[in-house]
Image (spheres, rainbow, N blue to C red):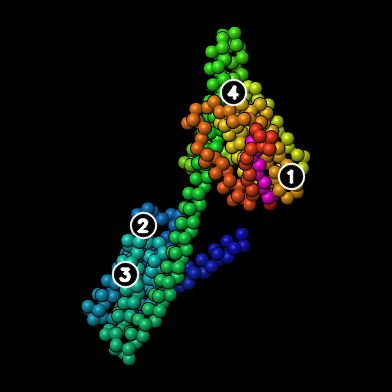
Amino acid sequence: MRSAWLRGSARGAAVGALLAACVLDLMIAGEEGSPWGQAVLLAVGLTAVLWPASRRPAWLTPQLRTAVPALLSALYTAAAVVRDRTAPFGPGELVILLCLLFVAVRHCPPNRLVACAALDALAFLATPCRQFWPLWSQDGAGLAYIVVGLVFVLLVGSLAAYLRSLDYRRTVAVDDTRREERLAIAADLHDFVAHHVTGILVQTQVARMMTSVGPERAEQLDPVLAGIERAATEALASMRRTVGVLRDTPEADRRPVGDLAGITGLVENFGGDPGRRVVLHRSPAVPDDLPHEVQAAAFRVVQEALTNVRRHAADASAVTVRLGFDGERLDVTVVDDGRGGAPLPAEARGGGFGLVGLRERVTALGGDLSTGPLPAGHGWQVRALFPAR
């Protein structure tokens, strides 16, 4: 609040100083003759500089704001030189032209930047010609004014160019961040949909098997069909939320990432598969306030591991999910007793990119991921260790 007040006060002081300089210009013009020409120049320049950005119409582009006042000033100077008559100039007009030079260098489009900046600089440097013509007359006072003016032009132009470069780098950084975030969202969408669709495929195969055995088992189809419906609904909801985020819709939910609490739902839904027992062991030492990135990655580890059980170890009868905590690291382990039975079609088994992406996610957080068969000769284990902070 205090910094905003200070910025507002500084802005007000600058505007007041500019208006005072313009009043001085009008007083000088009144002493030398009619002040109307100078008044028109100052009015157009002040409008271009002080028009609030929030109320600025679309047609008042930076190139129009910077070119029109500079062109009027240059024409006023040229008229004085051609008519061989002195014309006034003062600090107000000079400051306005420098402000417009700053706006041109920082905000004009690249294809208009050089032309607008050159016009503002030339108009600024040409103003001494109204009083000192030829420039080398009166002991070279006009040349001295131009040399000093060049210094101001270089300073203002350099400052504006530096700020423009900062704006560009900030824009590039924001674009890169948005691109990386959208890629991460796309990976999330793949994880959710692959998990649910794999479950739909497995349960559909079970339903077909039941119907082929005989109609007397039809009543057992209801829980299987309910699982298919639930998985399809969750997949559609995940896609809808993710697409909403990608489209930047105001009503879009946050990224559909999970947390430690969501692992319970994963295990419960996975346990609905016929002939399979899934158990979740969560140590009481596991805190609920772990960083959100760690919880989301742990959720992804369990999700990918359970999805791979469906894809590559459909004969697994028991799956165990363990969450442990030793005070410094979160231990996420998923173990199954499958022997590699995979009745799914080859197209549905995946290309092995899930674990690759999972390893990148885990290592990006400073964790470690290990996967491999159990010593007993059958079964598989996926284990991830995450630093708690």
Q: Which of 208 and 139 is in front in this view?
A: 208
Main secondary-structure element of the magenta-colored stretch: strand
Name of the residue lying farthest toward the top: 216
- Closest to the camera, between mark 2 and mark 1, is 1
Q: What residue type is labelled 4?
A: Gly
Answer above or below: position of 300 versus 143: above
Name which of mark 1 and mark 3 comes first in the sequence. 3
Q: Nearer the viewer, residue 33 or 14?
A: 14
Residue 119's mark? 3
Disc 2/disc 1 C-alpha distance (Å): 61 Å
Disc 4/disc 1 C-alpha distance (Å): 32 Å
Dot 2: element: loop
Which residue is found at the position 77% from the left and 39% from the top?
Answer: 284
Disc 3/disc 2 C-alpha distance (Å): 17 Å
Residue 325's mark? 1
Which residue is found at the position 54% from the left and 25% from the top?
Answer: 343
Answer above or below: position of 203 versus 35: above
- Closest to the camera, between mark 4 and mark 2, is 4
Dot 3: element: helix
Which residue is found at the position 67% from the left and 37% from the top?
Answer: 374
Q: Is residue 44 visible?
A: no
Q: Residue 139 in the image: x percent, y percent?
A: 32, 91
Dot 1: element: strand
Dot 4: element: helix
10 Å crowding of disc 2: few (<14), some (14-19), many (20+): few
* Residue corresponding to mark 4: 227
- Closest to the camera, between mark 4 and mark 1, is 1
Name which of mark 2 and mark 1 comes first in the sequence. 2
Magenta span: 380-388
